[in-house]
Image: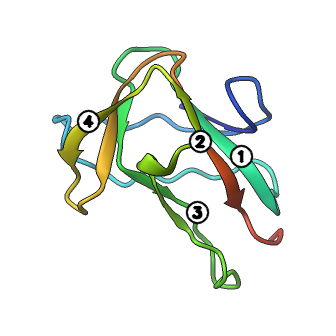
Amino acid sequence: VEVRLGLGTEGQLIGEFSPASTRGWYTYFTAYLAIDEDIEGVHDITFVGKDTGGVLNLAWFELSDFSERSDVYSRIPVTEYADQSGIRFENVQSTNGDFTIGYYDNGDYVTYANVNFGPAG
């Protein structure tokens, strides 16, 4: 999965991760991603499926290292997207009670608008 700034599949690449197999579509693992750039301020962020079908199911994502960012909401449910292509929401909730997206395949994307990365650091 590529993580890009901006809308759609052509924005600035800021990170990538390969989801681990959980051996079940409704079993979730926490995955961590280091962002390659020192991003600050408010940006759109897009997750782009790459290389295969059935890339992942996703319930939420979180920006971490928020010790000095108490005014920033770090956890973002997948249902709060601004734009998407190819994905579908499932009528299933994760163990945290969040609805999930699934059928996330190569070239599919989901964009979240106005994500506050806070100050650089």
Find numbered disc 2 in the image and state the secondary structure of the residue it sits on. Answer: loop
CB atoms at circles 3 and 2 under 8 Å apart?
Answer: no
Q: Name the residue under label 2.
A: 82
Identify the amino acid type marked 1. Answer: Asp
Q: Can you give x and y, in whole percent of width and height, for residue 28 in the image?
A: 26, 48
Residue 60's x, y, as percent? Answer: 42, 53
Name the amino acid type tagged 2. Answer: Ala
Left or right placement of residue 108 versus residue 113 in this view: left
What is the quadrant of residue 46 in the picture? top right
Q: What residue type is disc 3 on?
A: Leu
Q: Which of marks 4 and 2 is nearer the N terminus?
A: 2
Q: Earlier in the sequence, mark 3 or mark 4?
A: 3
Residue assigned mark 4:
90
- Residue at mark 1: 44
Q: Where is residue 51 drawn, in percent x and y?
A: 50, 15
Mark sitting on residue 63: 3
Q: Give neighbour class at mark 2: few <14, some 14-19, many 20+ (Cα, 10 Å).
A: some
* Contact flag, marks 1 and 4 (Cβ < 8 Å): no
Q: What element carries label 1?
A: strand
Against 60, residue 109 (above or below) is above
Hey, which quadrant is residue 39 in on the image?
bottom right
